[in-house]
Image (tube, rainbow, N blue to C red):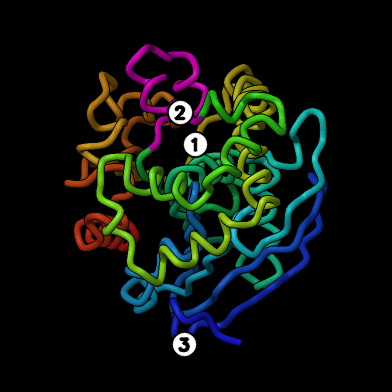
Amino acid sequence: MGDALFPGFEVLDLDVEHEHGGTRVHAVLGGQGPPLVLLHGYPQTHALWAGIAPELARDHTLVVPDLRGYGDSGRPADAADHRPHSFRAMAADVAALMAHLGHDRYAVVGHDRGARVTHRLALDHPDRVTRAAVLDVLPTAHVYAHVDRRLATAYYHWFFYLQPAPVPEDLIAGDPIGYLHTLLGGWGGPLGAHSPAQLAEYERCFADPATRHAMLEDYRAGASVDLEHDAADAAAGHRVSCPLLVLWGAHGVVGTGPDDVLAVWRERAERDDLVTGQPIDAGHFLVDEAPMQTLGALRTFLAD
């Protein structure tokens, strides 16, 4: 059965195994050319990329998965330290998926949580990642180290989701679709930026309590084990060694904040000249709100 949002693409469901705990990965595959992985964020699925995937597929073999815990990928069992939902485990899923497909080296583009997985993938698998693009994020450790009233207000969900289960899960269960719409329409852009077909896909997935719980476990890992991994990398001097493109929404939380976005990311790279980027005339969901500008920036970067 195909994917209506990705006509002509192959649908793959693959059980991956690795040292960080395997799971089932759901993905769509299509196009021709050098391999390119596209990673979505919260509260979306691989459907995020439906608008620009046909254009990217002209020049690239696309691999577009759902992250573990999201969409139609597997929901790993919980652990007290949240490691099954860590960015390291998610990055290992992608590496295993690409190895299965026979892609030894590939570019990666990620938005939101997917951008954090992209960052981790570039650190953990530097021999695999040729180029990386992170969309509308600052590094996780930087965010937690620079929380102020503005950021805590805008990123309230980060701290809400850290509360022990099932408190946030039960509260969201009161009106999950209404809450989903608040998220999709409340971070600098309108709900209408997402197509009806995309929105229906997000609603289908968010309606599942197991999916919502797994998404919250992602955030719990982000404030615990992921920070441990980041601290270990910082202590060891591990930095991104491939070209890194940084795009952010000019009207979103990142774009309206006090940080010099490129300077922050250059601190995470082996050399300043590896990091390039620009603001996009959009809020947080720049792929949906400004698809042509985002696509143009990605194409230029990937063609270099």
Amino acid at dot 2:
Arg
Alpha carbon separation for disc pair 2 and 3? 38 Å
Q: Is residue 224 above or below residue 17?
A: above
Q: Are marks 1 and 2 in contact (CB under 8 Å)?
A: yes
The amino acid marked with disc number 3 is Gly
In-image side of 57 versus 255 (left or right): right
In this orientation, does residue 161 appear?
yes
Q: Which of the labelled discs sits on residue 268, or is there none?
A: 2
First in residue order: circle 1 vs circle 2: 1
Q: Which residue corresponds to mark 3?
A: 8
Q: Is residue 161 left or right of residue 59?
A: right
Dot 2 or dot 3, earlier in sequence: 3
Please tell me whether mark 3 sits on a helix, a strand or a loop: loop
Q: Classify mark 2: helix, strand or loop.
A: loop
Pointer 2 local density, CA inside 10 Å: few below 14, some 14–19, many at least 20: many
Magenta stretch holds residue 54 = no
Q: Which residues are magenta?
A: 137-157
Left or right: 241 with respect to 293? right
Give the label, 1 or 3, closer to the camera.
3
Which quadrant is home to the N terminus? bottom right
Q: Which mark is residue 240?
A: 1
Q: Check disc 1 and report its element: helix, strand or loop.
A: loop
Q: Is residue 37 visible?
A: no
| Horizontal and vertical percent position of residue 182 | 38, 44
Residue at x 34% of width, y 38% of height: 275
Residue 104, image x and y in percent? 62, 63
